[in-house]
Amino acid sequence: MKKPDKDIDLMVRACYNMDELYNRGEHPMKFLIVVDMQVDFISGSLGSAHAAAIVPNVVEKVMSFEGKVIFTRDTHFDNYFDTQEGRKLPVLHCVKDTDGWQICDELKPFVDSVVDKVTFGSVDLPKYILGCGEPIEEIALCGLCTDICVISNAMILKSTFPEARITVDANCCAGVTMESHQTALDAMKAAQIEII
Ligand SMILES: [Zn+2]
């Protein structure tokens, strides 16, 4: 079966050699993905002290980042309890347009680009990134939760952009538990994602 052209295009773009680009004097793009820093994950139905504690770190990271910042939003609907996620995690959260779905107040002033996603990892995120500019030198990630949505998106981005430097800032992430946070960091490190 013939591959659609856009898939071939994505493949070519994902295989840029950064050293060659630098030698040609080109300036690759840097992205920061701020994952699900939403009210429900910080002070709402799935909030935690660890999540609240990283908010100032994430604000600082966003403010000092030299590149394009993209926020993601976990997004559910009235049918949440009938979804696979809802059956395994029967705690209503991040229902579209509710207060809990919003990016937290501290980060709201920085929200320019947003990708809504209906599950942990976003298959739209790599396409959105490519639409913002290329070639891509670095994609940094931070946010919530380390062991669910941060790791899911980090793995998708590492797979899509094998020549980009993928980094995760451990001090700007929080997990469901401290143990699962650390387990996820170890798993990402094993997959050659840089934990900083
Ligand atoms: Zn969710």
Image (spheres, grey):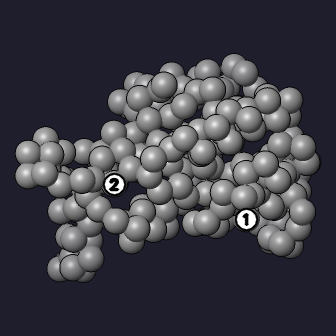
Q: What residue would you read off at disc 1? A: 75
What residue is rendered at 80% in x and 61% in y? 102
Mark drawn on residue 29? 2
Mark drawn on residue 134? none
| Label 2: few (<14), some (14–19) or many (≥20) C-alpha neighbours in 10 Å | some
Q: Nearer the viewer, residue 68 or 121?
A: 68
Tell whether circle 1 marks a residue whose Cβ is less than 8 angstroms from ligand 1: yes
What residue is rendered at 21% in x and 79% in y? 5
- Left or right of 110? Residue 125 is left
What residue is rendered at 83% in x and 43% in y? 42
The N terminus lies in which quarter of the figure?
Answer: bottom left
Residue 189 in the image: state x and y as whole percent.
43, 25
* Mark 2, secondary structure of its residue: strand
- Snapshot quadrant of residue 134: bottom left
> Reading the chain from its start, which is encountered first: label 2 or label 1?
2
The answer to whether residue 167 is visible is yes
Q: Amino acid at mark 2?
A: Met
- Left or right of 50? Residue 59 is left
Residue 33 in the image: state x and y as whole percent.
54, 50
Mark nearer the viewer, 2 or 1:
2
| Label 1: few (<14), some (14–19) or many (≥20) C-alpha neighbours in 10 Å | many
Q: Amino acid at mark 1?
A: Thr
Does the CB distance between marks 2 and 1 fall below 8 Å?
no
Q: Nearer the viewer, residue 165 or 176?
A: 165
Cα–Cα gap, marks 2 and 1: 27 Å
Residue 13 in the image: state x and y as whole percent.
22, 61
